[in-house]
Image: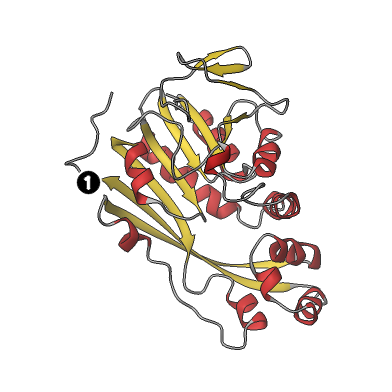
């Protein structure tokens, strides 16, 4: 299922090494992941989230504030994959692995046989993800040009990440699905109102972005309130762009609140590939 990022030939695994017939090889890191990100595919020396952002996100997610989002994704995945065998699944932009690990556990609990890959461009994020599970195949790689044979993934999840329809089309099995979680118009409403003089509440339109390559199957909207202690408020700031868009005074005011109530609004969209000029499934 994995292909060489250099020549696109199939990769074979031998113990702690991946190699192709053209003798390109990749060693497994001591944490358990494979780095398939070529230097020419990087836009910076350390692309993606840095360690501080990764640790903040890990603490925030481990506290359970977004567990209901994870639960909704897992239930949708179970419904889509029920009674299928040996399915390939990719969490693209997996970050530090919270959603990936919980998806793996949910599918395993329902005896859905699967091979699950977690892919992210941030090495710090993937290192953290390796601590969550050794049963998931963690990869540092580029989500725009992934190291996979085409049209093999029965399920692809994209949680709060940039959407790249061309890549998703290349990856998705003709009978597979793509599940995208994206922020609704009023996601983190109170935080935006505190930070910005003129906050904008504009909904990201995943359906519009995906329409040329995928059919929209269904949407589920999650809309709930979370209550954060100052430590979790600080983690939320550090794991989002809001930290560097807000002044020290604003952050201090937010952190002075013993409990910050925030609205969480998420769109969970499911898509299936349009049939036509896609690659044939192997």
Single out the residue that lies furthest toward the front. Answer: 40
Instruction: Give the side of residue 218 with respect to residue 117, left or right.
Output: left
- Crowding around mark 1 (Cα neighbors within 10 Å: few <14, some 14 to 19, many 20+) is some
Q: Picture quarter containing residue 247?
A: bottom right
Instruction: Give the side of residue 221 with respect to residue 117, left or right.
Output: left
Single out the residue that lies furthest toward the bottom. Answer: 197
Most foreground residue, 19 or 100: 19
Residue 255 pos. (x, y %):
80, 73
Write the residue at 38% across / 33% down: 153
Q: Quadrant of the N terminus?
A: top left
Write the residue at 72% across / 53% down: 63
| Total marks in image | 1
Residue 123 pos. (x, y %):
66, 40
Instruction: Give the side of residue 48 with respect to residue 111, left or right.
Output: right
Q: How is the image coloured?
A: secondary structure
Residue 214 pos. (x, y %):
27, 50
To which residue does mark 1 refer? 274
Residue 281 pos. (x, y %):
26, 28
Q: Quadrant of the C terminus?
A: top left
Residue 16 lies, with reference to residue 213, above or below; the image says: above
């Amino acid at each position: 299922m994995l292909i060489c990022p250099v020549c696109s030939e199939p990769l074979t695994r031998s113990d702690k090494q991946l190699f192709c017939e053209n003798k390109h090889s990749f060693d497994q890191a001591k944490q358990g992941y494979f780095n398939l990100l070529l230097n020419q595919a990087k836009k910076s020396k350390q692309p993606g989230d840095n360690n501080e952002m990764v640790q903040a996100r890990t603490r925030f997610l481990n506290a359970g504030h977004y567990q209901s989002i994870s639960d909704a994704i897992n239930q949708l995945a179970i419904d889509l994959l029920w009674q299928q065998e040996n399915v390939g699944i990719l969490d693209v932009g997996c970050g530090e692995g919270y959603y990936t690990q919980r998806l793996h556990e949910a599918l395993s609990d329902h005896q859905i046989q699967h091979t699950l890959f977690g892919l992210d461009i941030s090495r710090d994020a993937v290192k953290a993800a390796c601590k969550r599970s050794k049963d998931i195949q963690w990869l540092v790689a580029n989500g725009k040009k992934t190291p996979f044979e085409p049209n093999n993934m029965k399920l692809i999840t994209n949680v709060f990440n940039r959407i790249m329809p061309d890549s998703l089309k290349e990856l998705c099995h003709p009978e597979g699905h793509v599940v995208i979680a994206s922020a609704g118009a009023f996601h983190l409403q109170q935080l935006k109102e505190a930070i910005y003089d003129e906050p904008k509440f504009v909904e990201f339109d995943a359906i519009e972005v995906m329409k040329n390559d995928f059919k929209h199957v269904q949407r589920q909207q999650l809309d709930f309130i979370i209550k954060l202690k100052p430590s979790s408020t600080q983690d939320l700031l550090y794991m989002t762009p809001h930290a560097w868009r807000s002044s020290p005074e604003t952050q201090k005011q937010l952190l002075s609140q013993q409990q910050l109530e925030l609205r969480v609004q998420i769109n969970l969209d499911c898509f299936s590939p349009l049939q036509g000029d896609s690659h044939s499934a192997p």
